Image: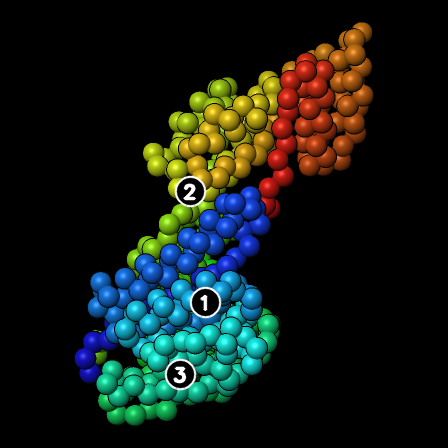
Amino acid sequence: MRALKILHTADLHLDSPFEGLSAGKAAMRRGEQRQLLGRLSSLVQREGVQLVLLPGDLLDSDKPYFETGEELARCLGAMGVPVFIAPGNHDFYSPKSPWARLKLPENVHVFSENTIAGVTLETLGVTVWGAAFTARRSGPLLRGFRCEKREGLRNLLCLHGEVGARDSQYDPITEEELAACGADYAALGHIHRASGLRRAGGTWYSWPGCPEGRGFDETGEKTVSLVTLTDDGCTLETRSVALRRYESLTVDVTGTDPLLAVNTLLPDDTVRDVYRITLTGECEEGPDLAAMQSALGELFFELRLRDETRPRASLWECAGDDSLRGLFLKKLYARWQAAHDEQTRRAVEQAARWGLAALDRREEVARHDDP
């Protein structure tokens, strides 16, 4: 059989709320998510893709913005090749769901049943099998299923689900079931970190992860997958289509100026990205987060600063002095000594630092960000 080139991506989560950003930046990010659709369409044309598999959570909810639905339909049609969508837990299929309401182009097929069904494309020599979540949860869809074998046809599977989690409420899938299903390639969705190409029996499979991060639990480079099936097997290449990245950076500021320490470790080009910088180590006084935010903010699309530094032992040197500072430190030092765990000691140390900053009429800023 001739080679077949597939674009496999999932978990776009269009119209995510981006709750960690300001209202203006969140709206900007949702607009940028729509632009991602156009880049996917261009990738299909540029790479000579013959088939697109989208296993779920393209939408973040059942209430997308009107312009998102319009752009989705336009870009899927512009791909000009067959597109298969298997709705997931965020965009599950129902008579009132966007998938039932949207006017999608003829090249797009949306699986709408909670049982696996197949669509044969004779011109490409494939049968694409898939199913939909029809509620926010789904039992195992692949269990007991096996593709129908036909001469001259490859079998492909497009499914939203969780591999290796037997108790999952999101279509639990086992490697044994993948091996037994008889698919040449299984395009999976749901997990936001890419798996790379895997094999179970005669079935090649993968999940691509999300194509663009939306929070600090989705840091680093995100990609989509180009999968090529030949008589000799299967290969997978990745392509980046993301506009921005989320990154976490930890900086030890012991014995140095915190701002200098951060600038020393920063990559050259961060202006498009969202960063969380965590300061660690020991210092005489807590870093001035407000001043650092002012100095560094324009280097990023969004910057979060966290102070997890520890004061040097000299913090308690004035405890007991005949002064307001000494009395304040004496009281906190007693709590520090009585603490039964490291977390409590760190909380007392932070309280001491904030108190000293107030006594010195300095501003100490605490920002509580995403966990």
Residue 360's spot in the image, x, y percent?
68, 14
Q: Earlier in the sequence, mark 3 or mark 1?
A: 1
- The residue lying at 30 percent from left, 69 percent from top is 78
- The type of residue carrying mark 3 is Trp
Q: Is residue 26 above or below residue 157?
A: above
- The residue lying at 40 percent from left, 64 percent from top is 71
Snapshot quadrant of residue 232: bottom left
Residue 134's spot in the image, x, y percent?
56, 79
Front tag of 3 and 1: 1
Residue 122's spot in the image, x, y percent?
26, 88
Residue 124's spot in the image, x, y percent?
25, 82
Q: Is residue 188 above or below residue 324?
A: below
Instruction: Residue at the far top: name it.
Output: 322
The residue that mark 1 highlights is 69
The residue that mark 2 highlights is 273
Snapshot quadrant of residue 72: bottom left
- Towards the viewer: 168 or 209: 209
The residue that mark 3 highlights is 129
Dot 2 alpha-carbon crowd within 10 angstroms: few under 14, some 14 to 19, many 20 or more: some
- Residue 62 in sight here: yes
Image side of residue 42 versus residue 15, left or right? left
Image side of residue 351 versus residue 308, left or right? right
